[in-house]
Image (tube, helix red, strand yellow):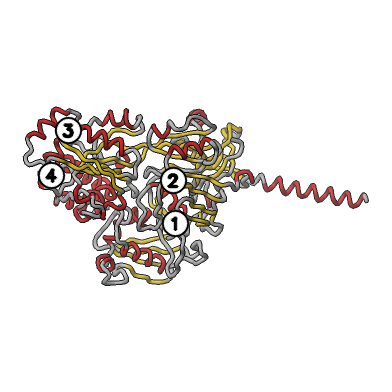
Amino acid sequence: MLKKLLVLLLITFSLSQIATADTNIDILAEIVLKKNKRLFIDKGRIDGVEIGHKLDILYDGRNFGSAIISWVGEDISYARVDSATFYRYYYIEPLEAKIYLVRPSKYEGGTVNVPFYRRLYLTPSEIMMPDEQAVACLLYDGLVRMNDQGNIIPGLAHTWEVHGNTYTFHLNSEVKFHTGKYLDALDVAYSLVQLARAPTVTPASSFILEVDGYDEVHSGRKNELRGVFIPNKYSIAITTKDTFIPFLKYMAGPGGYIIPSLERSPVPVGTGPFKVARINDNRITLAANTDFFETRPVVDSVIFSRYENRKEAALDFELGRLDLIYFDSQEDRDLLTGGDYSSRRYYTSSMVLLGFQCGHEYQKDYKLAKALQYLFDKESIVRVLLGNSARKSDGLTPPSLGIEPETTTDYYFMPSEAKTRIAEIENLPKQLNLVYDNTDPMLESVANYISGQLRHADFKIKIQQANSRHLEKSTALSSMDFYLFRTDLIVPDADAFFYPTFSGKLNGRTNYLNYDNPQLERFLDGARRLDDDYVRTDIYRETEKLLMESPPAVSLYNAYMTAAFRRDLGGFKPDLRAYVNLREIFFQAGK
């Protein structure tokens, strides 16, 4: 009996030692950068670091606090801390981090619930809206992706080469689709052909027009793209018609997502960290992809539930049925009256523009467009209609692009100047039609303000709403004089703003204003061919200056985004493109 007791004690002691060792595996790292309430650490995925790992913050060998790993790259990671903690650490050098490589079980599992408000299109050739990208970025990967610093990094391709107009990508042979099929070059070729065959083009997929052979495939004359060549099973070469510098940035966007060939599935299939478990018009349930080729997701599932409006979603958030809700107006923010949650406001690249139908005879000299630049009080729109949930536009382009012309046409709010200029215009129609995009709930009130200002300028105005996704086929397009819309920079490059919105090559497709300016085309073509960011920026400054002098639109405001979330939720990353990236989301213990 005594012998059995000794054996039992020995086993218990051994197990306790193993458990202690398992929970105390750690590495010592250096904190190399402190920026934006983040502590950047020189250890990453290749060192065994994962999201949710706890770390102690050390100075001179002493413990100064703790944090949780919020993001992980190959050889770098970061932990996000609050403002007070960040201030305390900012002036201490050098700081070290002791990272515990065993993540406590309380960080594992769980379901994250997020709302959406309209039908979502999740095929790569159709993705246009930020809420579509929020779901799609969980399902798909591209050959490359962009990191937080805006640099192109490997995705499904581990390396690539550029020779002239040809990009050769070498694929990761270990990647599986959600169906279990291994990724190969045929899948990439198939994905590009599907973009070319798509009846419509989106701002994110517009790069496919530059791939050699697009016209023949789009018209149905060919089944394969002439510019796509497969040297072997895990390599693919893509040739563009001409030098096209933004190509890799477009490939990192939703238009570059890869889908499987030779498989037909009733649900979207990709290689991403989550896969579709169930889907219908009102609910999308995503489950963690246990075969994901990078770090496996921490949470078990993400559920997107459809709501009729933000008020309904805000109520469920306060009742604890939603974990994260994001919106872009103070009116929506005010729907949340209480509860145990945190909220943050973020800049986005989204711009709201009032465009002019430049195909009409009375618009061709831009006199009306120039006159109306003086008619709208942007500060009042931002303050009164939006509750300061945006910033008024001084230029045409999203501020995130960093394009600020040194000299440009100076417009300001002066209704008397607008009326004087309008009185000088001949042959104006008696009634003008204002169409607004109903996919943005805030645009209805902005449209009403604009129509009121136009009526004060002695115009008769008819307001009509339309869905931007279907505007190409809408009867509203033919009768439209003004178009109020929001443009979301879904690919972070100036080309993705100017080209889809204003290029005459896309009239009636993504350019609904029928703006056709040969000088603009020369600027855009030139910028696409120059591999020098400084020179490209100078060209885009001239492009904005040109658009302000011969304006196809009034730029009204740059939208903010506010995210409200449970205090124990971490790892999500609000993106400048106005959506929340949930690929690395997790629940934090002790909050």
| Mark number, residue 410 | 3
Question: Please, what is the three-letter code of the amino acid marked with disc 2?
Answer: Phe
Q: Residues within 10 Å of mark 2 (few under 14, many from 20)?
A: many
Question: Please, what is the three-letter code of the amino acid marked with disc 4?
Answer: Gln
Q: Residues within 10 Å of mark 1 (few under 14, many from 20)?
A: many
Q: Earlier in the sequence, mark 1 or mark 2?
A: 2
Question: Which residue is label 1 attached to?
Answer: 140
Residue at figure coordinates x 46%, y 60% from the top left: 267
Is residue 309 toward the left or the right of residue 373 in the image? Answer: right
Q: Earlier in the sequence, mark 4 or mark 2?
A: 2
| Mark number, residue 363 | 4
Q: Residues within 10 Å of mark 3 (few under 14, many from 20)?
A: few
Residue toward you, 257 or 320: 320
Q: Earlier in the sequence, mark 2 or mark 3?
A: 2
Residue 541 seen in this snapshot: no
Question: Please, what is the three-letter code of the amino acid marked with disc 1?
Answer: Tyr
Question: Which residue is label 2 attached to?
Answer: 116
Q: CA distance from mark 3 to mark 1?
A: 44 Å
